Image (cartoon, rainbow, N blue to C red):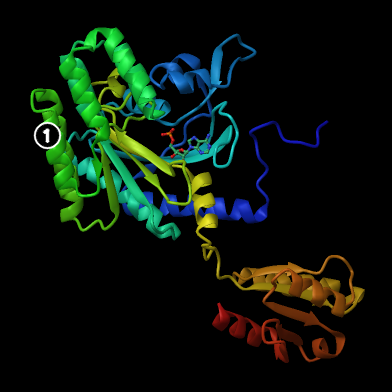
Amino acid sequence: MFRRTVRGMRDLLPDEAEKLRFIERTAREVAKLHGYREVITPLVENYELLSAKVGEENRKRMYVFEDLGGRKVALRPEFTASIARLVAVKMATAPKPIRLFSTGTLYRYDEPQSGRYREFWQANYELFGSSKPEADAEIVSLTNNLMEKIGLHDYHFKIGHIGILRGVLNQEGVAEEQQNSVMQLLDSRDWDEALRVVRDAGGGSEKCLDTLNTLFEIKGKDPNTVTQEIRETVQDYPEALEAVRNLCEITGLLEAGGVETDFVIEAGFARGLEYYTGIIFEVYVPEMNAALAGGGRYDKLIELFGGAKTPATGVAPGPDRMSLALEKQGTIPSISGDERIMVIPVDGKLVGEAFRISLILRKEGFCTEIETMGRSVSNALSDASRRGITYVVIVGPSELKEGKVVLRNMKREEQKIVTIDQAIAELAEAR
Ligand code: AMP
């Protein structure tokens, strides 16, 4: 009965955990490289905070419960609401821009499948205070840097701008609530149903439906050609035109900055979370259907949490899917080049000596294990070889009398008798 994890929850075994932590470490390094400082927010938050702008789909999928004090709380389904609260309340007077990084687990009652779990990881980067295209370009470029650094290849960015669709719908008088439903439907690529909602919400003019239909078809790799096509399609919608101009500025900056990655611009692309106001993007690899990262601009969220009007843009890469993508691309990340050393006492009387030597080696920074099963040297050696140990130190009575040990190079299957200092020097050279 207790032999299985709860559906959608996973145990990560050492290899998986190591890969995930490698991605997390790289994500933290990328944060540091770009000036993002880490914040840590609680996993349990008020339901009201989390449900305010998360989008209908994620609202339905929250783990909600009452704590023993009768408060309605939930496990966080995303970081952005918590970070927005923190910025609105605790960092209201901090000088702008504010660049923040966070990482940890999130919880969504999704239907479990490959790359979709109920407990999953995210790294999260947010830039507050700038409405300029350079802030959005920084977020895209940072995401690209992360994908590159972990060793992914052939990935592409799918890019859209929520202002184009909302610009058309605003001018056509479609209320915000209906617009949110349209975005959800577009997120699941249900074009027909999206058009039906627009029609029912009073945006059913021939021109509006034609414009939307044409937008849904526009997609391409060359930013200049695609944005020109979008511009022609929405030429009678000033707010949408402004959004196209913004999109052009951002892609222009990425080009000027030499960010060499494939971009696919899609005019009908929307994301499920309700709070986006500007550029939106996702990252994909050909081997998988699900996005590895998602991000965009959300200029109104801080106000929603009682803060001053603060423009914001950010991205959330998902380490679980990035790890899966590495596996599918056959990339084994070079997680640690560390030598792994095993100290083997020849007999029980030398265990204390083996302990002493292992402490000296660890003090020098070498990853050192000690034989704890009381096995013979030959059995301990085969175990060491099976587990990928690179060097073995054998502690035997005759060598020890001269202050020496046997140092065995497991890869080369060579060994020599050396002093501890000589062993340390040789191991340091191999490191
Ligand atoms: P979102 O917060 O929905 O924009 O998602 C951002 C990223 O988080 C996605 O691109 C995925 O990498 C990751 N992600 C979202 N939901 C899940 C899930 N259920 N399981 C695993 N990763 C997820």
Q: Quadrant of residue 49?
A: top left
Q: Quadrant of the C terminus?
A: bottom right
* Residue 386 at x, y percent in the picture: 75, 71
Q: Is residue 261 in view?
A: yes
Image position of 424 with respect to 312: above or below? below
Asked whether mark 1 and ligand 1 are closer than 8 Å, the reply comes as no
Mark 1, other Cα within 10 Å: few <14 / some 14–19 / many ≥20:
some
Residue at image point 59% right, 69% down: 365
Q: Which residue is mark 1?
A: 231
Residue at image point 52% right, 40% down: 121
Image position of 33 with respect to 310: above or below? below
* Residue 238 at x, y percent in the picture: 9, 24
Tell which of 123 and 360 is nearer to you: 123
Residue at image point 51% right, 29% down: 42
* Residue 184 at x, y percent in the picture: 38, 23
Residue at image point 58% right, 32% down: 118
Image position of 357 with respect to 270: above or below? below
The answer to whether 180 appears left or right of 395 in the picture is: left
Q: Is residue 94 in view?
A: no
Count the labels in the image: 1
Q: Quadrant of the N terminus?
A: top right
SS for dot 1:
helix
Task: Name the kind of residue labelled 1 in the image.
Answer: Arg
Image position of 103 with respect to 340: above or below? above
Q: Quadrant of residue 241?
A: top left
The answer to whether 369 appears left or right of 428 in the picture is: right
* Residue 79 at x, y percent in the picture: 44, 31
Tell which of 380 and 167 is nearer to you: 167
Q: Quadrant of residue 154?
A: bottom left
